[in-house]
Image: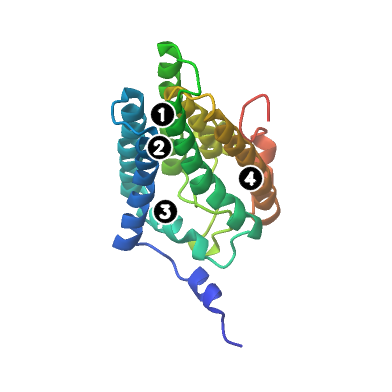
């Protein structure tokens, strides 16, 4: 019996991300700030420039660091949806929380700026939002540097000899990348001074919690050694809470 195309792709290790994937990734990163200023109708907005700068420069620096440590991880993340063993529910959840809702957040924040839906935020609130975004960016980068299996989708990466990671932030919680993301989107909303943007931020946070639970169950059922790791590291996202 011949192998399916999906299974062949699954068995073949991926080590190069490719120029096309780099261009696509850069375009997606730039798209958010472009939507922000387009919907705001102005470029005279220092909070918008700070948010855009953090996203563009921070994401670029983060991926550069990861590329130095785990170049194969970026290739995995770029092509993870093409793998044959991605969980069906994650093919729906992942694009929503990674692309659709973040773009909605940028658009809502821009419209809020244009039409003045939200009251003016105190400067310390906006700075606090900026701090949340920066800390979340550092936390997410740390998780990727430590975990070479930090895929963009939920799947067992058998072709990359997937194993349990328990170092660095994984000693504190089982899903530090999600923990960072949960706080980053509200941080962006506060930095941009938009109460309305907190709505898509909250939806993203809820879906991240749902995805965390589903992924954790998948790992406990399918990844050797993960159940023992979960017994040692009790909390998924927030120490002492969940």
Q: CA distance from mark 2 to mark 4?
A: 30 Å
Q: Residue 13 in the image: state x and y as whole percent.
A: 44, 66
At 67% from the left and 24% from the top, the residue drawn is 240
Q: Earlier in the sequence, mark 1 or mark 3?
A: 3
Q: Is residue 88 left or right of residue 10?
A: right
Query: Mark 3 packing: few (<14 Cα in 10 Å), some, or many (20+)?
Result: many
Would you say the residues marked 2 and 4 are in contact, meaning their CB atoms lie under 8 Å apart? no
Q: Residue 149 in the image: state x and y as whole percent.
A: 49, 51
Q: Residue 90 in the image: state x and y as whole percent.
A: 61, 54
At 61% from the left and 37% from the top, the residue drawn is 203
Query: Mark 1 packing: few (<14 Cα in 10 Å), some, or many (20+)?
Result: some
Which mark is nearer the camera, 3 or 2? 2
Quickly name the residue at label 3: 73
At 63% from the left and 45% from the top, the residue drawn is 211
Instruction: From this view, report whether residue 237 is shown above or below residue 116.
Output: below
Q: Is residue 18 visible?
A: no
Q: Depth check: 206 or 199 in front?
A: 199
Q: CA distance from mark 1 to mark 4?
A: 34 Å
Q: Is residue 15 left or right of residue 163?
A: left
Q: Earlier in the sequence, mark 3 or mark 4?
A: 3
Quickly name the residue at label 4: 211
Q: CA distance from mark 1 to mark 3?
A: 40 Å
Quickly name the residue at label 2: 39
Q: Secondary structure at mark 2?
A: helix
Q: Secondary structure at mark 4?
A: helix
Q: Earlier in the sequence, mark 3 or mark 2?
A: 2
Would you say the residues marked 1 and 2 are in contact, meaning their CB atoms lie under 8 Å apart? yes
Q: CA distance from mark 3 to mark 4?
A: 20 Å
Which mark is nearer the camera, 1 or 4? 1
Quickly name the residue at label 1: 114
């Amino acid at each position: 019996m011949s192998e399916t195309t999906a299974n062949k792709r699954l068995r073949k290790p991926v080590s190069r991300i490719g120029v096309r994937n780099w261009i696509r990734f850069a375009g997606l990163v730039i798209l958010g700030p472009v939507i922000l200023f387009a919907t705001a109708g102005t470029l005279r907005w220092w909070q918008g420039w700070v948010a855009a700068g953090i996203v563009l420069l921070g994401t670029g620096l983060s991926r550069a660091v990861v590329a130095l440590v785990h170049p194969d991880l970026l290739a995995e993340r770029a092509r993870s949806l093409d793998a044959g063993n991605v969980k069906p529910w994650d093919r729906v959840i992942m694009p929503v929380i990674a692309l659709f809702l973040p773009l909605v957040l940028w658009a809502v924040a821009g419209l809020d700026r244009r039409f003045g839906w939200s009251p003016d935020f105190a400067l310390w609130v906006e700075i606090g939002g900026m701090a949340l975004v920066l800390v979340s960016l550092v936390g997410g980068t740390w998780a990727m540097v430590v975990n070479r299996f930090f895929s963009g989708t939920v799947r067992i990466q058998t072709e990359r000899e997937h194993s349990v990671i328990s170092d660095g932030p994984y000693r504190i919680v089982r899903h530090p990348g999600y923990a960072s993301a949960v706080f980053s989107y509200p941080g962006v909303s506060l930095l941009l001074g938009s109460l309305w943007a907190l709505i898509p931020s909250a939806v993203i946070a809820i879906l991240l919690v749902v995805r965390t639970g589903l992924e954790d169950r998948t790992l406990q059922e399918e990844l050797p050694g993960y159940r023992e790791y979960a017994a040692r590291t009790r909390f998924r996202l927030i120490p002492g809470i969940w």
